[in-house]
Image (cartoon, coloured by chain):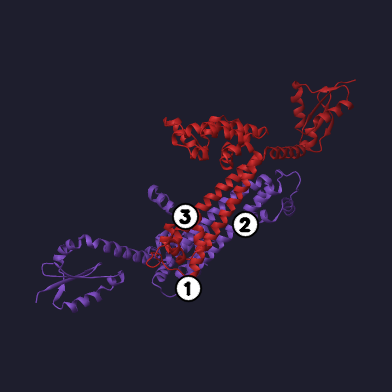
Chain colours: A purple, B red
């Protein structure tokens, strides 16, 4: 009985004779069968008991055989399917975090720019009132709800002799409308933040417990994925988000940055300046541990890790 | 009878003796009286018939008299009131146009940035669908209204084997929410545009008739005020908004720009390339005329001006 070779590729199982000429081609209907090629090979072995795997030194002869034009359409189809599957698999849930935190940042930016616009516009009408309200949230609210006179009353400013021009109801209405639209955008931002927080608690509970959801999400966004962040040493996590200062340090020998996104952490923000570096280092240390727990789906130790840092600096 | 001098300043009317010493000070209660200082001077002349205006060469003596500390508070108060009045007067209705057109541009920018964000996010879930919808408005609408499966059906794409990851209802919901928020922002932009159009038709009907409200408003915004725009020659109006190209021309001798904001005018956009410069020049010419009519509250000739250009190039 003549000896046979067999081999599999994305197109199916191929049975070849000793001169590597095609004997039989059992095509794969879809990409699932290629993934379970072991099963296909078992079947081949049953049908051709005397066959053996194609030795590596004869692979190139087989490859020449595959170059036939008749195989092109199936190659195209199956490779596309394979790629689609791989793309799908590489899109993890951490990608949603990146999108959500970017959306939050984008909304913040839009809100801030529109508020400056609103301030400039409203200041034509009521410069004293615009000046008196430094807080953006309060400012938007009051433009929506209060007339110029009501505002002056509540601020205790005399309403006559103010510098603003007088405007008709349509002109005032459109300014108030812009304020309402900004307010809606602020609500949109809150919704996105709530979603981001929920997502962070689900995907990286440990990191979220120590860093808070916004700082945690920014770290993740900067790293690009949970896997990348997991592979970073604590020292990198500590200065993530301070790239500008880091490169200045490397180029000009200026002081190295003590903290990046971590700087906004309540433990650091409330501590005396001299301790900032120390606390940042301790926090980054625990965060690096927490991310590893999150990536490998370990148990929840985030609260304990945070407590340890808190105890050390209180 | 001794001769008297009299003079007025923001503090009131002053009657002085021949050595420029104070005889009497009739203070102005508010800034309105300073504006009608003629009336005050009449009163002084009645009370001191032998008085005459303070000659210029003695003004400096009088000024030294005004340096007394007791005048400081009234100086402060009245000058503040005067400034307020001037600020109020200098804020014309054309300032509202600048604000409105800036708001429209700001909203456009925010919408565009948020849509790119939405596209990136939605593409994780449904890359084929995101790709298929090039139009931003249609894209936002369809994210809000159609499920992934409905979308595939309407686009005629097979729904299985797509590259997107599968998401839970919460994750899909927040993407749809962002789309809704963007849609609300698009509505806000439409409202601002409607207001801007109405304002332009009211304040510069002639310019609006020729240029359209958006191009007209951009020209006004670039010029800074209706008065400035009125003082520009037609050649400046023609290239307003093409500052970059103009300075490149002046610095490197590159071609001078043929048109700035005017380039978006339907007459130019629909004409063959070779005619662009000619039409831009003709339009700018008529616009310059129209702005002058608007500034001096002349009659409405905008439609005739536009017709003249249309007739010439059709």
Give the labeled residue for mark 2. Answer: A137
Give the labeled residue for mark 1. Answer: A304
B93 shown above or below A299: above
Q: Chain of mark 1?
A: A
- Asked if both marks, 3 and 1, belong to the same chain, the answer given is no
Q: Secondary structure at mark 1?
A: helix
- Quadrant of residue B123 in the image? bottom left
Mark 3 closeness class: few <14, some 14–19, many ≥20 residues within 10 Å: few
- Quadrant of residue B53 in the image? top right
- The circle on residue B73 is none
Q: Which quadrant: the N terminus of chain B?
A: top right
B52 shown above or below A30: above
Mark 2 closeness class: few <14, some 14–19, many ≥20 residues within 10 Å: few
Q: Chain of mark 2?
A: A
Mark 1 in CB contact with mark 2 (< 8 angstroms) = no
Q: Secondary structure at mark 3?
A: helix
Q: Which residue occupies 38% across, 48% down?
A: A251
Q: Which residue occupies 60% across, 39% down?
A: B208
Hey, which residue is sitting farthest right in the picture?
B1
Q: Chain of mark 3?
A: B
- Quadrant of residue B308 in the image? top right
Instruction: Between residue A286 and residue B220, name the one nearer to us.
Output: B220
Q: How many marks?
A: 3
A230 shown above or below B307: below
| CA distance separating discs 3 and 2 | 27 Å
- Asked if both marks, 3 and 2, belong to the same chain, the answer given is no
Give the labeled residue for mark 3. Answer: B116
Q: Nearer the viewer, mark 3 or mark 1?
A: 3
Mark 3 in CB contact with mark 1 (< 8 angstroms) = no
Instruction: Between residue B135 and residue A248, name the one nearer to us.
Output: B135
């Amino acid at each position: 009985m003549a000896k046979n070779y067999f081999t599999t590729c994305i197109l199916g199982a191929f049975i070849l004779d000793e001169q590597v000429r095609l004997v039989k081609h059992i095509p794969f209907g879809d990409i699932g069968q290629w993934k379970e090629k072991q099963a296909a090979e078992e079947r081949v072995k049953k049908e051709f008991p005397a066959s053996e795997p194609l030795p590596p030194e004869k692979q190139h002869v087989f490859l020449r055989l595959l170059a036939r034009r008749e195989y092109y359409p199936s190659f195209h189809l199956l490779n596309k399917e394979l790629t689609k599957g791989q793309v799908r698999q590489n899109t993890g849930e951490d990608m949603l975090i990146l999108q959500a935190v970017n959306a939050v940042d984008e909304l913040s930016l839009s809100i801030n720019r529109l508020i400056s616009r609103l301030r400039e516009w409203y200041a034509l009408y009521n410069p004293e009132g615009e000046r008196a309200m430094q807080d953006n949230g309060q400012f938007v609210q009051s433009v929506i709800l209060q007339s110029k006179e009501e505002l002056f009353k509540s601020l205790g400013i005399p309403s006559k002799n103010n510098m603003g021009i007088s405007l008709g109801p349509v002109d005032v209405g459109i300014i108030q409308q812009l304020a309402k639209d900004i307010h809606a955008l602020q609500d949109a931002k809150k919704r996105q933040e709530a979603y981001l927080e929920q997502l962070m608690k689900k995907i990286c509970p440990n990191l979220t417990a120590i860093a808070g959801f916004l700082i945690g999400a920014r770290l993740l966004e900067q790293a690009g994925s949970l896997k990348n962040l997991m592979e970073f040493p604590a020292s990198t996590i500590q200065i993530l988000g301070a790239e500008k200062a880091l490169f200045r340090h490397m180029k000009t020998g200026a002081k190295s940055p003590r903290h990046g996104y971590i700087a906004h952490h309540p433990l650091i923000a409330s501590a005396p300046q001299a301790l900032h570096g120390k606390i940042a280092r301790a926090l980054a240390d625990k965060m690096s541990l927490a991310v590893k727990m999150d990536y490998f789906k370990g148990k929840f130790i985030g609260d304990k890790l945070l407590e340890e840092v808190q105890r050390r600096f209180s």
